[in-house]
Amino acid sequence: TAAKMSIGKEELVNKLRAAGVQFDVHEHAAVLTVQEQTDVLAGISGTVVKNIFAKDKRHRLYIMSALPSTKVDLNTMSVRLGTGKGGLRFAPEELLGEFLKVPPGSVTPLAIANPGTEKVVVFLDESMRSHSEPLLVHPLVNTASLSMQPSALEQALRVLGREPIYVNFGLEPKIDKENPPDLAKHTVEPQEKPAVLAAIEASGGAAAATTAASSSKPAGQQAQASTSSKGSQKQGKGAAAAPAAAATPSAYAQHQAGTDVAAITEEVLQKVTQSLMGKDLATATAEMDSYVLLRLRADVESQLNTLKNTAYTMGYGAGKGAVVGYANKQFA
């Protein structure tokens, strides 16, 4: 998948115009969030479309495009897709380049124009279909926006080989044996683990996973492990020297562990169930309402991802400011 080349903004624009799709192109500064895009397009009539890039446990990918006022609950969508407990999460940033082939801040339903996106499922907010204003979407880059009517977006997707799939994101249908997941029919077959994620795990994920697994043990188990370790050290006095301590994880591995939203979510849930129920997460899971736990997991993940993205955005802004400041001193 990674070997396939992406198309550029101009190629996409030319392809859509050649097919008769009506839209206007607005160039602007790079933006990373919906709010930044809204601000930079303040003088343009239209509504910015927010986009969520998600992945389920079977490595299937989804783009969910909605109006800013529409709440997209990954927990609810996970149930409706039939992907199981905590089955749907925000896709790691590394997959943007691997599959959508767009930079951060550029997720768009039009990303399906790129080769290798044939199995990426796109869901559109049902509210967009009757929206009175033009919709503003990125043309594969975050330095421009296309202004188009909802019908034009539909036409664009058809030109790119997709029939639009509209979803009422606010719907919470009853799902049970008699009522199967209503969106499962839109899923594709399970996929292999993306090469970029496998490479990350191979280069540093093992150390990160070990750290996360250790921190997620119940307090009692951690104390027991600590006591056992001390006892072994005492018994070893006068005997052969103990093996050297494990090497400190690399900065890369520490970064991966510190930004692994899924692992940190499990750690938080572990501590919550241990503190409130006096039980480890596995035991508590068997006793709790699975739907409640699913919602809690999705909410925690959503908040952590918001915090992570905000930190990235602030870091980007600080770095850009430092570069500009240095350039001003050097070349003023």
Image: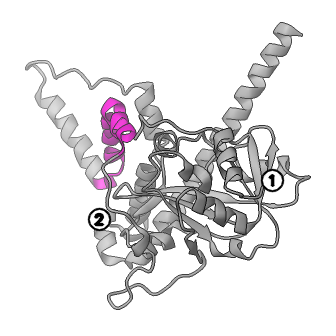
> How many residues crowd mark 2 within 10 Å: few (<14), some (14–19), many (20+)?
few
Name the image quarter holding residue 59: bottom left
In the rendered image, which residue does mark 2 sit on? 282
Is disc 2 in contact with disc 1, using a CB cutoff of under 8 Å? Answer: no
Q: What kind of residue is marked 1?
A: Thr
Q: Is residue 280 visible?
A: no
**In the image shown, does 213 or 290 lie closer to the viewer?**
290
**In the image shown, does 236 or 331 lie closer to the viewer?**
331
In front: mark 2 or mark 1?
1
Q: What kind of residue is marked 2?
A: Ala
Q: Is residue 77 visible?
A: yes
Please give the name of the residue rendered at 69% of the width and 51% of the height, measured from the top-left corner: 18
Rendering coords of residue 155 (x, y %): 65, 64
Residue 278 counted in the magenta span: no
Rendering coords of residue 150 (x, y %): 72, 67
What range is drawn magenta here? 194-220
In the rendered image, which residue does mark 1 sit on? 38
Circle 2 sits in a helix, a strand or a loop, which is it? helix
Please give the name of the residue rendered at 51% of the width and 58% of the height, measured from the top-left corner: 301
In this picture, is 188 found above or below 169? above
Q: Quadrant of the N terminus?
A: top left
In this picture, is 253 found above or below 34? above
Q: Quadrant of the C terminus?
A: top right
Is 196 on the left-hand or right-hand side of 11? left
Please give the name of the residue rendered at 30% of the width and 40% of the height, measured from the top-left corner: 210
Is 40 on the left-hand or right-hand side of 168? right
- Looking at this rendering, what residue extends furthest in the top direction? 330
Report the Cα–Cα distance between label 2 and label 1.
43 Å
